[in-house]
Amino acid sequence: MVTAADRALVERGFWAKLRKHATTAGREVVEKALWLYYAARAPQTPAWARSVIYGALAYLVLPADAIPDALPAIGFSDDLVTLTAAVATVALFIDDAVKAKAAARVATWFGSTAHETQ
């Protein structure tokens, strides 16, 4: 069960970390993190899925990491694996509305890609 304190911890660190490290982490990490974030906030997402999501997002935001984020080229690879596993687990709750919100935010940070504008 995800507590209000767990959600608050992730919420505080999530936006700060993404804003600071978006370009270093890369589009794929940011996009998956945003899918999870918006899916967790969707009212139809059940508690078990929120637990998975907040666990993965906590791994992204907390400083303890299997591979330090400061390492060039590989620093966010463990985060990507964690986020990808969470996305696969809760994929039913990552609907088109969640993906659209994430795509809009990603486009503001990275610009749009050719397939987003079509």
Image (spheres, rainbow, N blue to C red):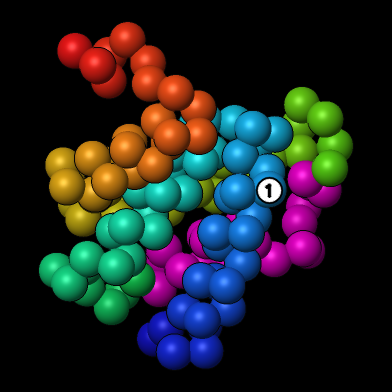
User: To which quarter of the image does residue 43 belong?
Assistant: bottom left
Q: Nearer the viewer, residue 18 or 52?
A: 18
Where, quadrant-wise, is the N terminus in this rendering? bottom left
Q: Residue 72 at what x, y percent from top left?
A: 83, 30
The reply to whether the magenta stretch includes residue 53 is: yes
To which residue does mark 1 refer? 20
Q: Residue 10 at what x, y percent from top left?
A: 54, 71
| 79 is higher (above) or lower (below) than 56 | above
Q: Residue at x 85, y 37 (%)?
A: 71
Q: Nearer the viewer, residue 18 or 61?
A: 18
Secondary structure under badge 1?
Answer: helix
Where, quadrant-wise, is the C terminus in this rendering? top left
* Other residues around mark 1 within 10 Å, as few (<14) / some (14–19) / many (≥20): few
| 104 is higher (above) or lower (below) than 11 | above
Instruction: Find the residue positioned furthest to the bottom.
Output: 4
Residue 87 visible within the image? no
Which residues, given as a range, are shown in magenta?
51-69
Q: Is residue 68 left or right of residue 80?
A: right
User: To which quarter of the image does residue 96 belong?
Assistant: top left
Q: Amino acid at mark 1?
A: Lys
Marker count (numbered) = 1
| 55 is higher (above) or lower (below) than 83 | below
Q: Is residue 68 left or right of residue 46?
A: right
Q: Residue at x 14, y 69 (%)?
A: 44
Q: Residue at x 76, y 56 (%)?
A: 65
Residue 35 visible within the image? yes
Q: Residue 67 at what x, y percent from top left?
A: 79, 46
Q: Is residue 74 left or right of residue 96?
A: right
Q: Residue at x 77, y 45 (%)?
A: 69
Q: Is residue 55 left or right of residue 106?
A: right
The reply to whether the magenta stretch includes residue 22 is: no
